[in-house]
Amino acid sequence: APVFVAQGVTGTTRHPVPLDGQSCYLVVGAVSHGAPRGLGLHVEGGPLEATDERGASDDAGVVAFCARRERVARLTVVARGAQVRWGLAVFRVPSVANSAATP
């Protein structure tokens, strides 16, 4: 199940995303309506930074990142195009480093 979901429209939208330190995350976003000219995803918080800036014709994006001590990430979505509506979900995924330490 997603740990965070959001919706938005054309333009720039920012969301704080709560994090559970020592975890990895996958952000998946897509345009659901309109005439998109690109969907950009950017996540930052402390030393972490991850970006998906695909080409002008892309209507979806994905970003993966791992948090160490960060408790909140700043998620920015830039939706370009006419009458665009988008949705996204953030999923917590197993960390390979944490899995390897577990017997």
Image: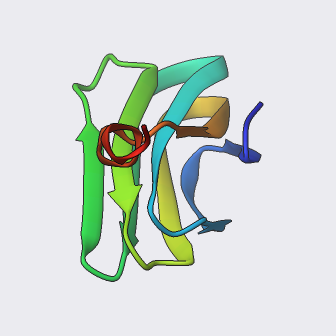
Which residue is at 37% across, 39% downward? 63
Relative horizontal placement of residue 7, taking residue 73 as reference (left or right): right
Q: Would you identify the image quadrant in which residue 32 lies?
A: top right
Q: Does residue 61 sit above or below 27 in this rendering? A: above
- Taking depth in this image into account, of 26 and 68 the one nearest to the observer is 68
- Taking depth in this image into account, of 96 and 64 the one nearest to the observer is 96
Residue 94 appears anywhere in the view: yes
Coordinates of residue 2 in the picture (x, y in percent):
73, 37
Coordinates of residue 68 in the picture (x, y in percent):
37, 70
Residue 38 appears anywhere in the view: no
Q: Does residue 77 sit above or below 14 in this rendering? A: above
Number of numbered discs visible in the structure rendering: 0
Q: Which quadrant would the N terminus be assigned to in this image?
A: top right
- Taking depth in this image into account, of 40 and 83 the one nearest to the observer is 40
Relative horizontal placement of residue 3, taking residue 12 as reference (left or right): right
Q: Would you identify the image quadrant in which residue 42 lies?
A: bottom left
Relative horizontal placement of residue 5, taking residue 92 as reference (left or right): right
Coordinates of residue 38 in the picture (x, y in percent):
38, 30
Which residue is at 55% across, 31% downward? 29
Q: Would you identify the image quadrant in which residue 61 lies?
A: top left
In the picture as drawn, the residue positioned furthest to the front comes out as: 103
